[in-house]
Image (tube, helix red, strand yellow):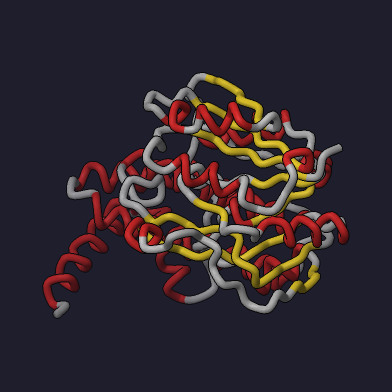
Amino acid sequence: MINLSVIVPVYNVESYIRPCFESLFKQGLDDGDFEVIIVNDGTPDRSMEMIADIVGQHNNITVINQKNQGLSVARNNGIAAAKGEYILMPDSDDILIEYSLKPLLERALESKVDLLVADFIAMNDQEIGAKQHLALRQPEPVFVEKTGRQLFLEDLNPYHCYVWRTLYRREFLISQNLSFYPGIRYQDVPFTHECYFKAQRCIRTNISLNVYRKWPGSATNAYKIENAKDFIIAIGLTWKLRNIDGFSSDMLYKLEEDVYVSFRLLIYNILGFCKQKSEREGLMDYLNIHAPDLNFTHSFLQRLITMMIKRMPHTFINLYYKYAQIAFRKSP
């Protein structure tokens, strides 16, 4: 068995993919120590051409070509083909910080933890371009071993359910039947929560592994109706995790609060981009179909919101829309 499988789905990233792949081979790892699995998700642009020479220079790269099925299926197919003891799943528009991966992989292999969760740095294109290279200064390394449930309670930020910051033990993913829900964006949210719930031994480190590229065309920024529908499905899937056996009361409370955070973000985005009343109302109907069990109870406001989205969803979203318009006009 090799030490690591790096799975990189590729779709419409011709302007960003080359720096990503160049960074994979600036980690101080020998090619024999790891494999790179490229999942070409039917990309219609020149992404694969942009890295053709890199693929030809390394015999540890495998290319899986498939028709476009989305990021979830691409990652699932990559995991199925992987042979490494650990799996890393970077996005193809992000960059690994030089020589950041080797110490993280060494610690994971030594400890045999289910998850090793690193930090990351967010930059836009201009900030990345200002760096001649990405050998960024790292803090003094700290590795803290935790259970998955401790990691969930103490470290999981519902806004940062990014799979690319984590090394996953492949046998853990297989034994726990962990996979990405197909066909939606925001699949990271339910996947990350479930991984944390089911992991036994984990490590949290302050070492930054990735530079997360903030750009307007990314899946998280190009918001539209289909994004909202996908986010609703992700919210429903995350809420269903309450049915996992062995939840403590504090874990259940945290999960419900995380879902409420996602719900508020959904409403914020609906108010921001849905100018048509019919669109707003349609999304509230979609929420009640795909996340029918939502029941926020931790405050009077949460209980009121739950009642309204169940009994009068159209009134709720349209009143909220009018309130947001008034508040925006009054803001300086």
x, y (%) of residue 75?
61, 36
Q: Which sits in the foreground, 178 or 279? A: 178
Q: How many labels does the image show?
A: 0
Picture quarter with the N terminus: top right
Taking the image as shown, residue 147 lies to the left or right of residue 250, namely right
**Residue 60 makes an appearance in the image:** yes
Q: Give the image quarter of residue 324.
A: bottom left
What is the x, y in percent for residue 140? 68, 78
Residue lying at the far left of the rendered structure: 329
Picture layout, residue 326 above or below residue 8: below
Residue at position x 47%, y 23% in the image = 42
* Residue 292 visible in the picture: no
Residue located 36% across and 48% down the image: 284
User: Is 113 in front, or is 190?
Assistant: 113
Q: Which residue is drawn at 83% across and 43% down?
A: 171
Q: In this view, does 323 lie above or below 331?
A: above
Question: Could you tell me residue 293's position as x and y percent?
Answer: 55, 51
Q: Is residue 88 left or right of residue 16?
A: right
For the point 87% across and 59% down, the residue is 110
Is 39 on the left-hand or right-hand side of 79?
Answer: left
Tell me if residue 270 comes above or below residue 261 in the rendering.
above
Task: Give how far across and how far down residue 19 sits, in percent.
Answer: 47, 46
